[in-house]
Amino acid sequence: MIEIKNVSKWYGSFQVLTDCTTSIAKGEVVVVCGPSGSGKSTLIKTVNALEPIQKGDIVVDGISVANPKTDLPKLRSRVGMVFQHFELFPHLTVTDNLTLAQVKVLKRGKEEARVRALKLLDRVGLQAHKDKFPGQLSGGQQQRVAIARALSMDPIAMLFDEPTSALDPEMVNEVLDVMVDLAKEGMTMMVVTHEMGFARKVAHRVIFMDAGKIVEDCSKEAFFSPTEERSDRAKQFLSKIL
Ligand code: ADP
Ligand code: MG
């Protein structure tokens, strides 16, 4: 579903990604972790072409981001993205947050979009809040709205960039629970997170990044079993967060 092939990227003269290669199969859940500044956000943003790459290619469902003929807005609309800071439209109600792109981008009728929105709000447990504005919701509720909004576009894959790291601790699980359900339903997911409980529960693979490189890319079982093969950097990182 997602193929990342020898991707390198620079911000000016600073090389932020170096020769990153991995792939994510349909239905696979891959957790990306690593120290701050290692390039996790940048890598995940290159997958839906929010950040351009200078070398290599990324192919999402057969569509190449490096191909100048690719319709990047269309590609973006097919890959859902959830950020650390929710990024909901503050001046729109919860329901309108969920219908806007359906109507504008997918050209759905308003009623069809509304029905879909309410169904998704029900799924994340927020139907009762449909007419509120984002500022009237808790962080955990806002993040669940953001997930529902991404799902309203019927994405072929979902990208999450530290979706729980801005939340108060008591709200982390309500968001992770929604993500666990999604994973169990077979959604293809690339998740930057340090929530190793989530990784243990639903990840198929774990990627560990350091200084712009993919240092480890292995099964969850291999990642969490302390073997000699574990890189020193990953061992050090795990010892700090576990
Ligand atoms: P992570 O998500 O793993 O913390 P990022 O992908 O955000 O890492 O950042 C990787 C590196 O790239 C960091 O050194 C960061 O300072 C740098 N960086 C990120 N965004 C930009 C930008 N827009 N311009 C210049 N440097 C950036
Ligand atoms: Mg980041």
Image (tube, rainbow, N blue to C red):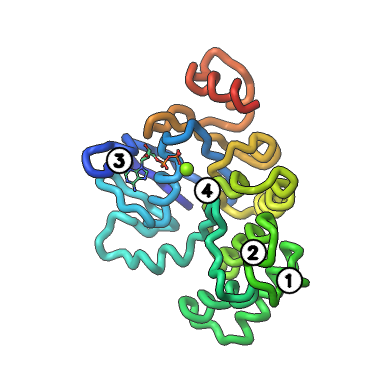
Q: Residue 212's spot in the image, x, y percent?
A: 37, 34
- The first of marks 3 and 4 along the sequence is 3
Split into quadrants, the picture shows ligand 1 in the one at top left
The crowding category of the residue bearing disc 1, from other C-alpha atoms within 10 Å (few below 14, some 14 to 19, many at least 20), is some
Question: Along the horizontal axis of the image, is 215 left or right of 69?
Answer: right
Residue that numbered label 1 is attached to: 129
**Among the 4 quarters of the image, the one containing residue 194:** top right
Q: Which residue shows up at 28% across the image and 44% down it? A: 11
Tag nearer the camera, 1 or 4: 1
Q: Is residue 181 visible?
A: no
Q: Which dot marks residue 161?
A: 4
Q: Residue at x 46, y 76 (%)?
A: 105
Of 12 and 192, which appears nearest the observer? Answer: 12
Q: Amino acid at mark 1?
A: His
Q: Alpha carbon of mark 4 to alpha carbon of mark 2: how far?
A: 15 Å
Name the residue beneath numbered marker 2. 145
Q: Earlier in the sequence, mark 4 or mark 2?
A: 2
Lower sequence index among marks 3 and 2? 3
Q: Amino acid at mark 3?
A: Ser
Q: Quadrant of the C terminus?
A: top right
